[in-house]
Image (cartoon, rainbow, N blue to C red):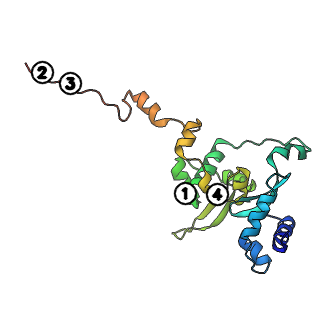
Amino acid sequence: MDELVRAVEATLFAAEEPMSAEAISTHLGGANVKDALAELEEQYRERGVQLVERGKRWHFQTAPDLAHLLRREREETRRLSRAATEVLAIVAYHEPVSRAEIEAIRGVQTAKGTLDVLMEAGWVRIVGRREVPGRPVIYATTPLFLSHFGLESRKDLPGIDELRAAGLLDPVEDALAAAMDVPDVGETEPAEQESTD
């Protein structure tokens, strides 16, 4: 095995958290680690531990089909409230975003505790302040969010058509049209033909 590949492998095993290729390179004196990472990813592909990239950060993780072997205790499932789920989705799709922007999209006020829960879970973080009067705090998702949901980047978030197909979107427009007894968009009533008599 190439010495650089071994050095990258050792660096990632010793790292306390996922590392970007740039951070690994810096740690190894500026070496180009792209090929070494690709080689390690291939070498570990079929093993019990795999090298994965999440949010442009690399780390080793247990192969998904073996994760159940390492669970010693039953994990307590903690479901997010509807408000927290909505806020997480808004942050993921619109980041960086302020609380006021979240509230404008949701149409209701957002409790401070909702964002606190998401930050405690490690899925949302404060990334700065908007350069507007009041300088509101802005939020974005974290690499842990990407890792938890198995996404390489935010580009992998599902689109509207995928969400609708999965039944995760309320067909609001259809329900509103039905309630108002209005024909669907694109459907028009045939025009009355004029009499030629």
In x, y percent, where is residue 162? 56, 42
Point out the tag, 2 or 4, that comes first from the N-terminus.
4
Disc 2 on helix, strand or loop?
loop
Point out the tag, 3 or 4, that comes first from the N-terminus.
4
Q: Nearer the viewer, mark 3 or mark 1?
A: 3
Figure quadrant of the N terminus: bottom right
Disc 4 on helix, strand or loop?
loop
In x, y percent, where is residue 106? 54, 47
Query: Going 75% across and 80% down the picture, which residue do you hit?
Result: 30
Mark 3–mark 4 distance (CA, rounded to whole Å): 54 Å
Pointer 3 with pointer 1, Cβ within 8 A: no
List the residue tagged with mark 3. Answer: 192
Say what amino acid the circle numbered 3 marks: Glu
Mark 3–mark 2 distance (CA, rounded to whole Å): 9 Å
In x, y percent, where is residue 175? 47, 31
Say what amino acid the circle numbered 4 marks: Ser
Disc 3 on helix, strand or loop?
loop
Point out the tag, 1 or 4, that comes first from the N-terminus.
1
Residue 91 in view = no
List the residue tagged with mark 2. Answer: 195
Figure quadrant of the C terminus: top left
List the residue tagged with mark 4. Answer: 153
